[in-house]
Amino acid sequence: MKVVLIGYMTSGKSAVGKLLAKESSLDFIDLDAYIETKEGKSIPTIFKEKGEIYFRLKESECLSELLNSKNSFVLSVGGGTPCYGKNMEMINALSQSVFLKASINTLCERLKIGKISRPLIAKISNEKLPEFIGKHLFERTPFYVLSQNSIQTDGLTIDKIVSQIKKRLV
């Protein structure tokens, strides 16, 4: 079984993914970490040195490699991953997808902590963050909602989210 967690930055994909993988006796893979290992560079460095287009191409390549493997796992993808190329189509064809949906307020509060390590928002002031997230969600939600499952995560613990996911997986 392959499970792919989808959602905006800080929606809980990694935290939920790690616990879901542990409780399901599956490996957990973070797509960004996988890319960093393959490239030998951090995501911010890849963005800085080679640009977003290069990164998105590498992201699609790595996603395809993982989804077409024989391995079972829980995969957390970047917030933009479903929105490029045929990524969302590939995710739904080769795995069970789950959209972790969080409100703009929840995302803002989480993103204010450690945003310097996130290339897309590092230079955006905290005051402008809600507007930026709102615009991004407006663009990305049409891709996110193509997920086979969707869970509203506001106010839920990681344990509760994992429990809901496990009930929905076939």
Image (cartoon, grey):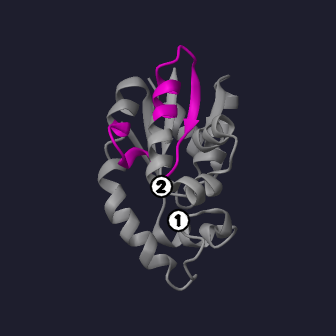
Kindly state the secondary structure of the residue where label 1 is placed.
loop
Point out the stretch of residues depicted in magenta: 61-88
Which amino acid type is shown beneath numbered disc 1?
Leu
Q: Residues within 10 Å of mark 1 (few under 14, many from 20)?
A: some
Tell me the residue at 52%/43% (across/down).
77
Which amino acid type is shown beneath numbered disc 2?
Glu
Kindly state the secondary structure of the residue where label 2 is placed.
helix
Tell me the residue at 60%/68% (across/down).
111
Q: Which mark is residue 120?
A: 1
Q: Position of residue 119 (x, y in %)?
A: 58, 63
The answer to whether residue 169 is left or right of residue 93 is right
Does 63 appear in magenta?
A: yes
Residue to which mark 2 is pinned: 52
In this rendering, is residue 120 above or below 63? Answer: below
Does 126 appear in magenta?
A: no
Q: Residues within 10 Å of mark 2 (few under 14, many from 20)?
A: some
Q: Nearer the viewer, mark 1 or mark 2?
A: 2
Q: Nearer the viewer, residue 160 or 96?
A: 96
Q: Position of residue 74 (x, y in %)?
A: 58, 31
Q: Quadrant of the C terminus?
A: top left
Q: Position of residue 160 (x, y in %)?
A: 60, 46
Tell me the residue at 36%/30% (across/down).
90
Q: Nearer the viewer, residue 7 or 121?
A: 121
Q: CA distance from mark 1 to mark 2?
A: 10 Å
In this rendering, is residue 54 above or below 44? Answer: above
